[in-house]
Image: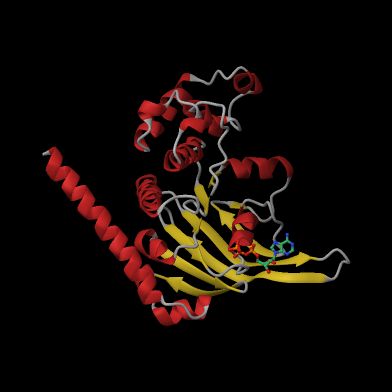
Amino acid sequence: MLSIDRLSKTYGTQGGASGDTALNNVTFQVPQGQVLGLIGPSGAGKSTLIRCINRLVEPSSGTIRLGETDLAAVRGRDLRRARRRIGMIFQEYALVERLTVMENVLSGRLGYVPFWCSFTRRFPGHDIENAYRLLDRVGLLDHADKRADALSGGQRQRVGIARALSQEPELLLVDEPTASLDPRTSRQIMRLISEICRERELPAIVNIHDVPLAQQFMHRIVGLRRGEMVFDGAPDDLDDAMLTEIYGAEDWTAMRQEHEDDTTAEQDTRLQLAGGAG
Ligand SMILES: Nc1ncnc2c1ncn2[C@@H]1O[C@H](COP(=O)(O)OP(=O)(O)OP(=O)(O)O)[C@@H](O)[C@H]1O
């Protein structure tokens, strides 16, 4: 379980005066297996929150507990150890393009194996077996030996998911996982992340811009506005009035309708394919 308590971040300015307050007393917990979607307009503090958790940004105050560890307080070797417990999934996948799918997945083990293993790219047998299992789970077993640059965007993100899981993380931080993908592939990726977190009882925080997608797949949603938490609840409780409070006026009904039309079209295609195959 991840437990964030009164987390604040004020960025400094070059002259030493205090700058923007990006997070103000943010408090929430993410239980095992829960996928929490972080929404809010540009500048709301979503990236700052994710970066405080993996400590790419230094929190100004507050605590971030992962199990017994306060991630906001660890330093040096303890910080490196703590980071190994956090799996990251990125918008642009962050794969090594010239390496194979399998090598990319195994790179999630780099923090665990001795230097010579990574240098000679000889990983222990159980790491390799586990990597095959993960590739099977994300639907890429047949692609293990392909180079990453030969894959589609959706396939690359599946490799990114398998790599994060190969770390055997206790928490997943997911930054805009579908921003570079088409709507159908986006839904497949979000479904996969959500199912995997449930299966493995992994807590996850997903920074997500697409509100209908968040409402379809997240187990819970936290809304930020100017660094303050203005919503924390079930996706269905996020009504148009609350969305307008978070983002300002938009045609939420039209946006939701478009998403539903898209989802229905996808289901129809699946049924037709299933009918054709049977
Ligand atoms: N390195 C920085 N130095 C100073 N101010 C920063 C820095 N990074 C972010 N900020 C400020 O902190 C606030 C929150 O920014 P943040 O990037 O966390 O928002 P966000 O919700 O992730 O936005 P987006 O959706 O556009 O990525 C903004 O006012 C931003 O200008």
> Where is residue 216 drawn, in percent x and y?
35, 62
What colour scheme was applied to this rendering of the protein?
Answer: secondary structure
Choose top left, top right, bottom left or bottom right for residue 95. top right
Identify the residue at horizontal 50%, vertical 66% (top origin). Answer: 39
Q: Which residue lies furthest to the left in this view?
A: 278
Residue 237 in view in this figure: no
Image: 215 above or below 120: below
Image: 27 above or below 263: below
Choose top left, top right, bottom left or bottom right for residue 45. bottom right
Identify the residue at horizontal 30%, vertical 65% (top origin). Answer: 260
Identify the residue at horizontal 47%, vertical 80% (top origin). Answer: 244
Q: Residue furthest right?
A: 15
> Where is residue 137 drawn, in percent x and y?
35, 36
Query: Where does ligand 1 appear, by image quarter?
Result: bottom right
Q: Quadrant of the C terminus?
A: top left
Q: Which of the two residues, 98 or 214, is positioned nearer the viewer here? A: 98
Q: Which of the two residues, 239 or 134, is positioned nearer the viewer here? A: 239
> Where is residue 25 drawn, in percent x and y?
63, 72
User: From the viewer's perspective, is 15 left or right of 174?
Assistant: right
User: From the viewer's perspective, is 22 left or right of 91?
Assistant: right
